[in-house]
Image (cartoon, helix red, strand yellow):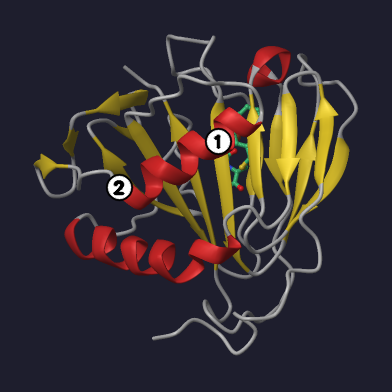
């Protein structure tokens, strides 16, 4: 109800690190909102449940996904696309909570994107061992808009590559409350999440959640 026992203690790390041209990690930028964000994820999943999508190649993803906002990302044997209607419920995706919009806008502004208005938020849920293989996010037509990502729960190792699949990757740990803004030249970089190691977080148990805010329309 009141967050965790450490709510009133100062945060250890609120550093800001530019990791590439256009990419900035804001450590613990979302931590003060942790409970509001996790409550909102639960409310969204009550309407549009987490599901394991199938890729066009026929593989079932280990990450479970849902969305909020006017558009949601979907995948099936026919391809990847954004949809206004959740194909599982045949209803619109849940509205983007005001707390999500406020956080995404503040993070984008901090990294220099002053007019970021996301219309889609993809919510990824990882269990131990789940991973996201190397990919680019290229289903959004307006590449001048950044993507803002918010990590909650157990940590993950993020792999950040270059513009070609074969480029070397740099590794960055992403922990609870960390926010990353991906714009400019970083917007189309290859990236991945390594299989999650066993861990526990007081608010999410053995889960990791990642929100990615996008302008998809
Ligand atoms: C770099 N999600 O949903 S967040 C995704 O942690 C995705 O669930 C990962 O990759 C996750 O597509 C990584 C970091 C991230 C998100 C989007 C990016 C990095 C990005 C888009 C372009 C470049
Ligand atoms: Fe991605």
The image shows residue 100 at horizontal and vertical percentages of: 39, 47
Q: Residue at x 71, y 61 (%)?
A: 175
Q: Where does the image place residue 164, in percent across and percent down from the top left?
A: 77, 15
Residue holding disc 2: 98
Mark 2: C-beta under 8 Å from nearest atom of ligand 1: no
Q: What is the quadrant of residue 40 in the picture?
A: bottom left
Outermost residue toward the bottom in this view: 5
Residue in the foreground of this view, choosing between 205 and 79: 205
Ligand 2 occupies quarter: top right
Q: For the N terminus, which image quadrant?
A: bottom left
Judged from this view, the residue extending furthest toward the left is: 91
Q: Along the horizontal axis of the image, is 33 left or right of 21?
A: left
Residue 20, percent from left and from top: 82, 25
Name the residue located 63 percent from the left edge and 52 percent from the top edge. 29
Q: Closer to the camera: disc 1 or disc 2?
A: 2
Element class at badge 2: helix
Q: Quick check: 37 left or right of 51? A: right
* Horizontal side of residue 208 vs 168, given as left or right: left
Residue marked by disc 1: 148
At 50% across and 67% down in the image, what residue appears?
34
When the figure is inspected, residue 210 is found, relative to residue 21, above or below; the finding is: below
Mark earlier in primary sequence (1, 2): 2
Question: Does dot 1 land on a helix, a strand or a loop?
Answer: strand
């Amino acid at each position: 109800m009141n967050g965790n026992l450490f709510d009133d203690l100062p945060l250890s790390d609120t550093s800001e690190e530019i990791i590439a041209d256009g990419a900035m990690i804001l450590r613990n930028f979302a931590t003060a909102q942790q409970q509001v964000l996790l409550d909102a994820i639960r409310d969204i999943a009550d309407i549009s449940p987490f599901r394991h999508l199938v890729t066009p190649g026929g593989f079932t993803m280990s990450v479970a996904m849902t969305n909020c906002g006017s558009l949601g990302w979907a995948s099936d044997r026919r391809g990847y696309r954004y949809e206004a209607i959740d194909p599982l419920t045949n209803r619109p995706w849940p509205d983007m909570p005001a707390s999500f919009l406020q956080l995404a806008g503040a993070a984008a502004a901090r990294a220099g994107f002053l007019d970021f208005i996301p219309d889609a938020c993809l919510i990824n849920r990882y269990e131990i061992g789940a991973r996201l293989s190397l990919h680019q996010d290229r289903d959004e037509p307006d590449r001048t808009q950044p993507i803002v990502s918010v990590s909650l729960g157990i940590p993950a190792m993020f792999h950040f590559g270059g513009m070609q699949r074969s480029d070397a990757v740099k590794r960055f740990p992403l922990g609870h409350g960390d926010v990353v803004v991906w714009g400019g030249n970083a917007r189309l970089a290859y990236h991945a999440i390594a299989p999650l190691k066993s861990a526990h977080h007081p608010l999410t148990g053995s889960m990791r959640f990642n929100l990615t805010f996008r302008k998809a329309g």
